[in-house]
Each structure stands twice: as structure tokens, then as C-alpha cells.
Amino acid sequence: MELAAFWAGLKLGLGLIVAIGAQNAFVLRQGLRREHVLAVALFCALSDAVLIAIGVSGFAAASTALPWLAEALRWGGVAFLSWYSIRSALAAIRGGEHLDPSAGSAPSLRAVLVTVAAFTWANPHVWLDTVVLLGAVSAQFAGARIGFATGAIVASFVFFFALAYGARLLAPLFAKESAWRVLDALIGLLMGSIAWKLAAGGL
């Protein structure tokens, strides 16, 4: 059960985190410019770890006090993931995403950390993904929430470090709009699949 929960957490964590957004674009930009790469990747991953732990542990306590909460949030998660899937599919069809990493001068470490902190802790989507959605899905793994949370946390560390340090290799690819469209299409398919399985009662 722990292993199944770990893989479910890893899969959902990756599915949520790879979505194109301000935080990921900032991490990618820092990686492309090779500026404070370790600090940015570590900050994002550790922040996710804290938020995931809050979501899983807090949701467990709340679901005990409110028995109906798990089912309500499960269907809320289905609705959110379905919307996410549709949004990504539309983004893939419309296109227009791009990344210009060359703008601006080299910032200080303090300025970079303040910026990434705002992208992380002041971003409602980050809270929704980590605390609310992952916390809700963790209820599907009674007795194995630690495994689920560990999988989601590993997903964050793998993604942020891969994105930050692999950015230089991706620079030529993501200069093209078509690359973002393919990524959005894949995200849409993954989110739709997760929503379907969650609606069916598990991942």
C-alpha cells in the first residue's frame, strides 16, 4: 500500500507541478541564465515539501472531524483537474506561449529569493495544488499518507532540480512555440486521466 501511495503521489505531484506558470517560468529563466540555480531549486522544492506536509497532515485531522469532507474534496479535485485538463488542451490548441530568458540584468541572491518566495507562497494555485488537492487525494490512502506525501515531495525535488539544471539544454527547444504546445497537450492528457481515476475512486 505504501508503494502504491508513493507512486500515486509521485504521479499526481509531477502532473500538477509541470504546468506552465509564473513559478516554473522563473525557475526555467534562472536556469537558462545560470543565476542562483541551486538556491532557487532548493527553495521551491523545500517550500513544496512544507506545503504538502501541511496538506496531508491537516487534511487528515480535518477529515476526522468532518467525515463528509473527504468526499466533497474528492469531487472538488475531480472538477479542478478536469478544468486544468481543458485549460491545458485549449492552450495547446491556441499556442502563444514562449519564454524570453534574456530580459533584465543579473539580480542579487536576496532579490531572487524574494521573487521566488512571492511566486511560491503568494500564489493561490500553489496552495490549491499542494495543500488542498494533494491533501484531499491523500485521503484515498488511509494508513499510507506518508508514502503519498513522500512521492509528491520527491516529484517536487526531481522536477525543480531537473528544470533548473536542465534548462540550458532546453533553451533551443523552448524558444519554439510548438514545444510549449506539445507540453500543454501532454499536461491536458495527464490531468484528464487523473481526474477520471479519482472520480472512479482512486489513482
Image (cartoon, rainbow, N blue to C red):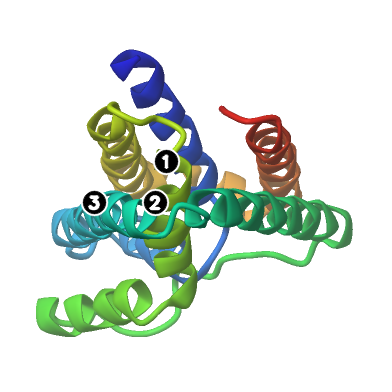
Q: Residue at x 29, y 39 (%)?
A: 149
Q: Secondary structure at mark 2?
A: helix
Is 130 positioned to the left or the right of 183 in the image? left
Q: Are marks 1 and 2 in contact (CB under 8 Å)?
A: yes
Q: Which residue is mark 2?
A: 135
In the displayed structure, 114 sits above or below 55; it is below
Return the disc, 2 or 3, that comes first in the chain's sequence. 3
Q: Is residue 192 left or right of residue 45?
A: right
Q: Provide the secondary structure element on which disc 3 rests.
A: helix
Tell me where residue 43 appears, x and y as whole percent.
18, 61
Q: What kind of residue is marked 3?
A: Ser
Characterize the local packing of mark 1: few (<14), some (14-19) or many (20 or more) Cα atoms within 10 angstroms: many
- The N terminus appears in which quarter of the rendering? top left
**In the drawing, does residue 147 fall left or right of residue 15?**
left
> Which residue shows up at 27% across the image and 55% down it?
61
Q: Is residue 203 above or below residue 117?
A: above
Disc 3: which residue: 57
Q: Nearer the viewer, mark 1 or mark 2?
A: 1
Residue at which label 1 appears: 139
Please name the residue shown 31% across and 82% down the image: 118
Tag 1: residue type? Answer: Ala
